[in-house]
Image (cartoon, rainbow, N blue to C red):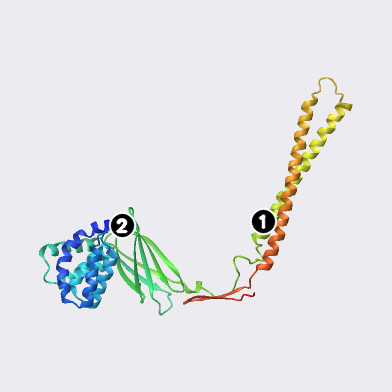
Amino acid sequence: MRHQAKLRAVLVAAAVAISLAPTAAAAQAISDEAKQHFRAGVAFLEDPDGAKVEDAYREFRRAYDMSKSPKVLGNLGICAMKLERDGEAIEALASYLRDVDDISEAERNQVTRDLHTLRTSAVQLGLSFSGAPPPAEISIIDVRVAIRGEKVTNTYKTAGDALAISVRPGHHIITARVPGVPEVHWEFDAAGGRKEAHTFQFKPDEVKKVDVLPSPLFVKNPTHPAKSSIAPWVVVGAGGALVAAGTVTGIVALSKTNAIAAECPNNMCPGGFELNAARSGARKWVTATDVLLISGSAVAAGGFVWWLLSRNKTEQSAPPPAMVGCGPQGCMATVNVKF
């Protein structure tokens, strides 16, 4: 945050130099409360840790709303420009140049250049809204995804069915929100100097009343068995597979043992018969059989115990269903709990 504040101080350095001196003096002509907000805005721009442009913008906006003095619009427009609220910046700076007479030549030239740059590059958006339940305040969240650096986010609000804003060129993701209605999005690439239009279509019908909303922790679904009921039987099946494999290896071990006994009655083997090698091979099959039978039996037993425990826990812990209703004003839930 400290690094970000210092960066913003660099960004607004020129703006402070050309606008604070004249407007600070002009602030004396407005009300005391408005002057306090104006001075707070100046203090935020001159913060030792770096200019706090968002805070300064809010203070200058309050000062102007209270006084309607056009001399506040110089700093307000500069802050809006740095925050990429380009439509507000164009309106404020144009009014500042038109309505304020005592602007120095250097400042007037600088503001004129800024205003020309904004008007040339800004993307004008005409937004309209359909399907929002009246009366509804619509929040518009504009996120510009910068190629380098952090995302730039601005929020606008309207109670009407249309809104005009100007944004910086680039890749934008705009989200429209209304309480109790699923939000809608518009993602697009904005070219400088262009005009774009988009209608946000809200769909309140997607939020319907739900008579019974089962608990996600304990509910048993008759058409889709809970994982806790299936998993133990998977383990039992795996144990059974190991036992079956142990049975096969046991048959092989028995056959090899019988073959040795047939070749070497009373441990007397014919010449050329490798008794030690034959016994070693038979022992490997016997060992494999023991491992498979023991481990398979243990796994199967563990899975069965798991099933018993999970079954008891589910039956004892399942809560009554929750009654949920959703509408334009949000969702409400009622749950009956017995102790």
Residue found at the far right of this picture: 266
Q: Which residue is mark 2?
A: 2
Comparing labels 2 and 1, the label whose residue is closer to the camera: 2
The residue type indicated by label 1 comes to Ala
**Which label number is shown at residue 112?**
none
Label 2, label 1: how far apart the Cα atoms are: 52 Å
Q: Position of residue 53 (x, y in %)?
A: 27, 64
Q: Quadrant of the C terminus?
A: bottom right
Element marked by disc 1: helix
Q: Nearer the viewer, residue 318 or 273?
A: 318
Residue visible at 17% across and 69% down in the picture = 24
Q: Residues within 10 Å of mark 1 (few under 14, many from 20)?
A: some
Is residue 234 something that shows in the picture?
Answer: yes
Q: Is residue 78 left or right of residue 148?
A: left
Q: Is residue 325 left or right of residue 25?
A: right
Q: Nearer the viewer, residue 258 or 7?
A: 7
Q: Position of residue 215 (x, y in %)?
A: 60, 68
The image quadrant that residue 224 belongs to is: bottom right
Element marked by disc 2: helix
Q: Which residue is mark 1?
A: 231
Residue visible at 79% across and 36% down in the picture = 253
